[in-house]
Image (cartoon, rainbow, N blue to C red):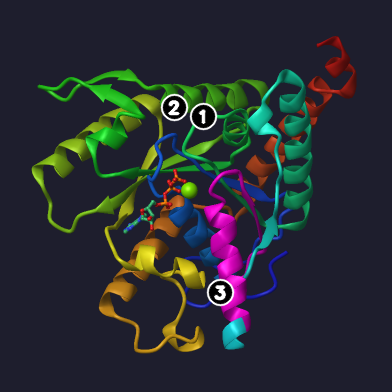
Amino acid sequence: MADRQGDGKPFDAECVSESGHVVVCGNEKGGSGKTTTAIHIVVALLKAGFSVATIDLDMRQKSLDRHIANRAAWARKCGVSLELPTRYDFVTRELDSTIETNFQDFAAFVRVVDELERDHDFVVIDTPGSDSYLMRLAHSMADTLVTPLNDSFVDFDVLGQVDPENYEIEGFSHYASMVRDARRQRREDHDGLIDWVVVRNRVSPLASRNSMSLLACVKQLSMQLGFRIADGIGERMIFREYFPKGLTALDEFDVVGLEGRTTRSHLAARDEVNKLIRMLRLPIDAQSRKLALSRGTWLSKSRELYSGNELHHH
Ligand SMILES: Nc1ncnc2c1ncn2[C@@H]1O[C@H](COP(=O)(O)OP(=O)(O)OP(=O)(O)O)[C@@H](O)[C@H]1O
Ligand SMILES: [Mg+2]
């Protein structure tokens, strides 16, 4: 439950929802900025006074978990207080994937998300840059799906293929089709909505022809697939350098034990992140709470579907 009022932040914590809102950061392309985006969303929500739980499904790298652990350690070391989420350490058996372990993962994951969203305004889930059973499950549970996309056609290819000459969209890729199916199913089964936002990442300040053609393709695809486009975050050192200390562009230099002053680049990065958070239109009103509730129904139905008895039939 929200206990602190945001001040000059993108939104104020006035939401006391019965059921938390699930934000998933996903893109099958590795290195697209999922974890960087996730930690900034987490810290922005915490700073605005919301309670946040996190799950890092990237079992190999655990970068989100590590960023948060680094943040806790840095706060202790400097004797300062830094906002921290409830970090849930979800352990999967994905690496020896069988129907039975998948089923156990499914049941455990649904239970964990269900529990976390009861006690938190938001649950933020970071996913790995490769297809996996749990990654797909997490996508189907999202209320808001955030897909960061590097400003490059190589990265775009994970969403759609384009004609090399006229840049018309020729087809959807595996990842985009997976998300489209997950959204369709949520809509059909439970009248629910997965708000899909593609966030352009590492955009160069110099508008290049490549960048403009790419944006035109992203716009075309957004009309075909029904996602929203958020003006991304630029290519900035600050998004890389604070990982060991667990800091973000949203933290104030003077309260986090850093030398020097907040630079212009730091402030610009903070503006970009705040703008992005506003673009995500995360729930602070009754309408959004209704959506979260509809997902609650979906979850309980899914649990029935995967009841313990069914396992024995496999
Ligand atoms: N806007 C940015 N400016 C500068 N560096 C960035 C930016 N966004 C991400 N990076 C850097 O790019 C690398 C990949 O980012 P990140 O780890 O967030 O991507 P990811 O999608 O989570 O990757 P993976 O698929 O491996 O989990 C990191 O080194 C990160 O610090
Ligand atoms: Mg990552």
Q: Earlier in the sequence, mark 1 or mark 2?
A: 1
Return the residue nearer the eye: 303 or 26.
Answer: 26
Around disc 1, counting alpha carbons within 10 Å, would you say few (fewer than 14), some (14 to 19), or many (20 or more)? some
The residue shown at (76%, 44%) is 112
Q: Position of residue 97 (x, y in %)?
A: 67, 25
Q: Earlier in the sequence, mark 3 or mark 1?
A: 3
Return the residue nearer the eye: 169 or 279.
Answer: 169
- The part of the image, by quadrant, that contains residue 188 is top right
Residue 35's place in the image compared with 266, above or below, is: above
Q: Position of residue 38 (x, y in %)?
A: 50, 54
Q: Is residue 185 found inside the magenta-colored segment of the image?
A: no
Instruction: Tell me which amino acid carries mark 1.
Output: Asp
Magenta span: 48-76
Label 3 vs label 2: CA separation?
A: 36 Å
Report the number of discs: 3
Circles 1, 2 touching at the beta carbon (< 8 Å): yes
Residue 58's place in the image compared with 159, above or below, is: below
Q: Which residue is mark 1?
A: 131
Instruction: Tell me which amino acid carries mark 2.
Output: Tyr
Q: In what element is the residue under mark 2?
A: helix
Say the numbered circle drawn on residue 175: 2
Q: Which residue is mark 3?
A: 6
Circles 3, 2 touching at the beta carbon (< 8 Å): no
Q: Position of residue 245 (x, y in %)?
A: 50, 73
